Image: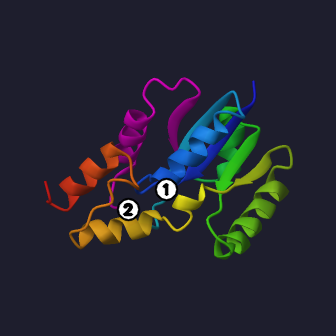
Amino acid sequence: MRKALYPGSFDPITNGHVDILERAAKIFDLVEVAVLENPSKEPLFTVEERVRMIEEIFRGKEKIKVGSFRGLLVEYAKKTGAQVIIRGLRAISDFEYEFQMALMNFKMEPQIEIIFMMPRVEYSFLSSKLVKEIYSLGGTLPDLVPPAVDRELKKKFNDT
């Protein structure tokens, strides 16, 4: 079985992330959304909230599962039996950082491949950071985030 991990903070997941996941599920037998628990960041949503939203979004999609991890990505990949790590690239500005991380992960675990995927053009400008900023200022983006995310963002920012 070919298993891939799609790691990230997903705070929150956007339709750009969903696009990459759905396309990756056509390539791999199983894709795990690996939600990063990063103690150095202060996320808007807890890991549990992020996992719950993503599970709701992909309920019934047998090829997509959700997990969370802390620590080194390559260690989590080995532990879960993933052979591939998927990283999303929106723009050239993402490439340098992602390339550096990919080389370091490859150095630590050369048996795990890293694949870069770009979202569809309509999501190429989209980031979780921008989404949070717009909702915090009273705006909404219901066409750029899944309904579960739109609902939870409105709750967080008291716009229900």
Tell me the colour scheme of the image: rainbow
Dots 2 and 1: beta carbons under 8 Å? Answer: yes
Task: Name the residue tied to disc 1.
Answer: 9
Query: Residue 114 location, x and y as percent?
Result: 77, 51
Task: Name the residue tied to disc 2.
Answer: 43
Quarter where residue 141 is shown: bottom left
Binning the other alpha carbons within 10 Å of mark 1 as few (below 14), some (14 to 19) or many (20 upward) gives: some
Question: Magenta part of the protein: which range?
Answer: 42-70
The answer to whether any part of residue 75 appears in the image is: yes
Against 2, is 106 above or below?
below
Residue 69 lies within the magenta run: yes
- For image coordinates 33% across by 55% down, the residue present is 45
Q: Which of marks 2 and 1 is nearer the N terminus?
A: 1
Against 129, is 58 above or below?
above
Amino acid tagged 1: Ser
The answer to whether any part of residue 35 appears in the image is: no
Is 126 positioned to the left or the right of 158 in the image? Answer: right
Alpha carbon separation for disc pair 2 and 1: 8 Å
Amino acid tagged 2: Pro
- For image coordinates 45% across by 33% down, the residue present is 58
Residue 127 lies within the magenta run: no
